[in-house]
């Protein structure tokens, strides 16, 4: 019997991951907002990536629903809502999921899988992580701008779905311990507010040493806290995460040479936080840099760099401005 898949909270990440699954033949139901339902009904899905792939799913082949009840027949549910909506998603899914359904949190942050598991007691809840950036270009076009496979907690319940993800070009990389992987991704996502405040493409931002020094400061602060907590971030790229702050501080000519071997980024790549500010939405800052601030408080310490970035994004949610690299660095050092 064919396994049915639902994508719950089908925005940028959800439409891209679910779209690639649908394009390769998997039966996928998208559950999300009426605005996206109308967009895909008009345009269908166009899915591209930094390697040059281009896939399409015609409007007639897309099942996009706006009611939680649409997930009732799903064997696998991919939760891709923003972190602030996890409690609501858990409540909605609890009323419709069939017993034994597999639920995967493909969300930013650290604690979403735990929130879902606490509420969805009849389901098998797993924590996953999407390491790449997806840009919503409008008109049903979603672009993967950086490299990476899908990371997920190892579990035998995934066996019926491994081949489908492989066929979709999104292989599942399974881990016995997902927490170090989550923290490694969060260390990379500490760049989200910097990119959003810079208001430039990701590659342009990372080509500027002043912006990189801002990220290095946020990462170094976080790594110190993780060491105190006894957590060693996983190596999800070609170099250990503990070396990142040092590499980010290198002069531009040297960083460019090293970055070419570490991570593929194309000119279209942007962060989800930049998209949220563009759209006037509340960001996930509390679940990224805010998570570092919470860890510091738990340890009886402070995280001034990450706390300042939280404050700057909160201000940007009210009134936007573009920060140059030197301006932002001075602000974080002040």
Image (cartoon, grey):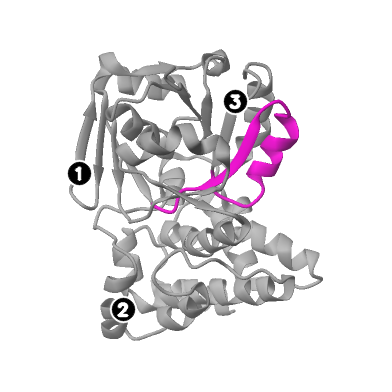
Place of residue 193 in the rendered image (x, y in percent of width and height, measured from the top left)? 49, 59
Local secondary structure at mark 2: helix
Q: Are marks 2 and 3 in contact (CB under 8 Å)?
A: no
Q: What quarter of the picture does the C terminus occupy?
A: bottom right
On the image, numbered disc 3 is attached to which residue? Answer: 101
Look at mark 2 in the image and give the residue it sits on.
258
Of residues 3 and 265, the one drawn nearer to the viewer in this rendering: 3
* First of labels 2, 1 by sequence position: 1
CA separation in Å, label 2 and label 1: 25 Å
| Residue on which the image places disc 1 | 53
Alpha carbon of mark 2 to alpha carbon of mark 3: how far? 43 Å
- The region drawn magenta spans 107-132
The N terminus is located in which quarter? top left
Q: Find residue 325 and report its horizontal and vertical position in percent.
A: 40, 73
- Residue 81 in view of the camera: no
Q: Does the magenta stretch include residue 165?
A: no
Which residue is located at x 63 percent, y 23 percent?
Answer: 93
| Above or below 68: residue 273 | below
Q: In this view, does 30 lie above or below 213?
A: above
Of pointers 3 and 1, the one earlier in the residue sequence = 1
Apparent side of residue 272 relative to residue 97 in the rendered image (left or right): left
Image x and y of residue 277, in percent:
46, 46
């Amino acid at each position: 019997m064919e396994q049915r898949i639902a994508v719950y909270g089908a925005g940028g990440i959800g439409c891209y991951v679910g779209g690639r699954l649908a394009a390769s033949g998997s039966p996928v139901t998208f559950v999300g907002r009426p605005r996206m339902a109308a967009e895909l009904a008009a345009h269908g899905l166009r899915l591209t990536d930094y390697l040059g792939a281009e896939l399409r799913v015609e409007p007639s082949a897309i099942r996009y629903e706006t009611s939680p009840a649409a997930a009732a027949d799903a064997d696998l549910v991919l939760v891709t809502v923003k972190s602030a909506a996890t409690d609501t998603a858990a409540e909605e899914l609890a009323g419709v999921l069939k017993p034994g359904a597999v639920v995967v949190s493909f969300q930013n942050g650290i604690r979403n899988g735990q929130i879902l598991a606490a509420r969805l007691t009849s389901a098998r809840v797993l924590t996953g992580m999407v390491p790449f950036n997806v840009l919503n270009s409008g008109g049903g076009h979603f672009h993967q701008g950086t490299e990476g496979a899908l990371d997920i907690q190892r579990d035998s319940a995934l066996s019926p779905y491994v081949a489908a993800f492989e066929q979709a070009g999104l292989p599942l990389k399974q881990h016995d311990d997902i927490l170090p992987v989550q923290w490694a991704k969060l260390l990379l996502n500490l760049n989200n507010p910097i990119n959003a405040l810079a208001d430039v493409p990701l590659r342009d931002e990372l080509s500027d040493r002043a912006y990189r020094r801002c990220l290095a400061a946020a990462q170094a602060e976080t790594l110190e806290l993780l060491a105190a907590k006894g957590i060693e971030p996983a190596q999800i790229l070609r170099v250990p995460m503990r070396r990142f702050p040092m590499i980010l501080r290198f002069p531009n000519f040297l960083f460019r040479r090293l970055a070419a071997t570490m991570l593929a980024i194309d000119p279209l790549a942007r962060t989800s936080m930049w998209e949220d500010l563009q759209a006037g939405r509340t960001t996930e800052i509390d679940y990224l840099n805010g998570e570092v601030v919470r860890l510091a408080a738990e340890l009886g310490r402070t995280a001034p760099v990450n706390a300042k970035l939280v404050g700057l994004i909160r201000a940007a949610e009210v009134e936007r401005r573009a920060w140059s690299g030197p301006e932002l660095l001075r602000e974080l050092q002040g």
